[in-house]
Image (cartoon, rainbow, N blue to C red):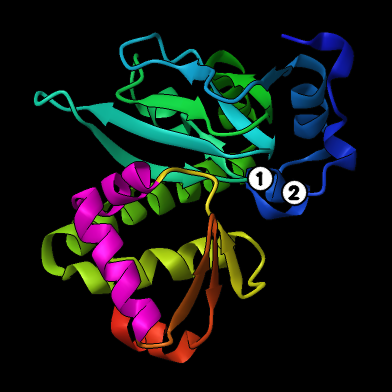
Amino acid sequence: MDDHQIPDCFDCDYKNHNVLLCATHETISRINAEKGFKIFQKGEHLFHSGEPADGFYFIKSGLVRTFAHLPSGKEQTFALKNSGDWVGFRDCISESRFNHDAVAMEETHACFVASSLIETLVHDDASFQKEVFRQMAKEWREAEEQVVSLGTKQVHEKVAEILLVLNNAQGNRGQVELKITRDILASLIGTKTETLVRALSDLKARDFIAIEKNKIDILNREALYSLSKIA
């Protein structure tokens, strides 16, 4: 861990948007004092599947992909984690080992919180405990929603949905910067790369989006929203 670069939790822009929101001053102070910090370069793993889940990472800046290796040799992408997100949280709380891989898609700055510390704080701080359980429920709900989406939606619906999700994650600027390959994007929605490319071309032909290299402009958000069937 790069201890000399550890940021201060009390100065963190995301302190009021995660489990620290309901934590006591003492709880935040303990996390601040005991957490680690590391800068991951593009392509570097935060952790591998099967490794002991002895803690989790909080992304201060950057982009992380979580995925699993399939028996076929391919990779199934589960999620893209951005600034303010947790990585490995569920496994840290509920499992002894990570059940997926996490890799940095660009330079990523992340704080590390040990599971032993979380267990102690959950016991000592009732408000923190409640927020931790709420975070776990949120992750399980998102996982269930992804399964439903992959199993019931058509490719165009999935593409529309992921473009809206990425746009939201990047600040609703009306433009999605693809920091991942189209292969990974296809894996994220459970389809083949060529099928994804055809769907993107079709959405472009309908003037829903405009594509320029690794940037996608959202031209008709309402049409994408309708197509995505997001509840």
Mark 2: secondary structure:
loop
Name above or below for residue 126 compared with residue 33: below
| Disc 1 from disc 2: Cα separation | 8 Å
Q: Is residue 36 left or right of residue 76?
A: right
- Out of 96 and 151, give the one closest to the viewer: 151
- How far across and how far down the image is residue 199, in percent? 27, 69
The quarter in which the N terminus is drawn is top right
Mark 1: secondary structure:
loop
Residue depicted at x 83% and y 28% = 29
- How far across and how far down the image is residue 88, in percent? 46, 29
Do the residues bearing badges 1 and 2 touch, measured as CB atoms within 8 Å? yes
Is any part of residue 230 visible from this angle? no
- How far across and how far down the image is residue 224, in percent? 39, 82
Residue depicted at x 69% and y 49% = 22
Type of the residue with mark 1: Ser
- Out of 125 and 38, give the one closest to the viewer: 38
* Quadrant in the picture for residue 153: bottom left
Residue depicted at x 58% and y 44% = 85
Q: Earlier in the sequence, mark 1 or mark 2?
A: 2
Name above or below for residue 12 compared with residue 108: below
Q: Residues within 10 Å of mark 2 (few under 14, many from 20)?
A: some
The quarter in which the C terminus is drawn is bottom left
- How far across and how far down the image is residue 205, in percent? 35, 83
* Segment colored magenta: 182-205
- Out of 168 and 201, give the one closest to the viewer: 201
Residue depicted at x 61% and y 33% = 106
Type of the residue with mark 2: Tyr
Q: Which residue is mark 2?
A: 14
Q: Main secondary structure of the magenta part?
A: helix
Q: Which residue is mark 1?
A: 83
Is any part of residue 21 visible from this angle? yes
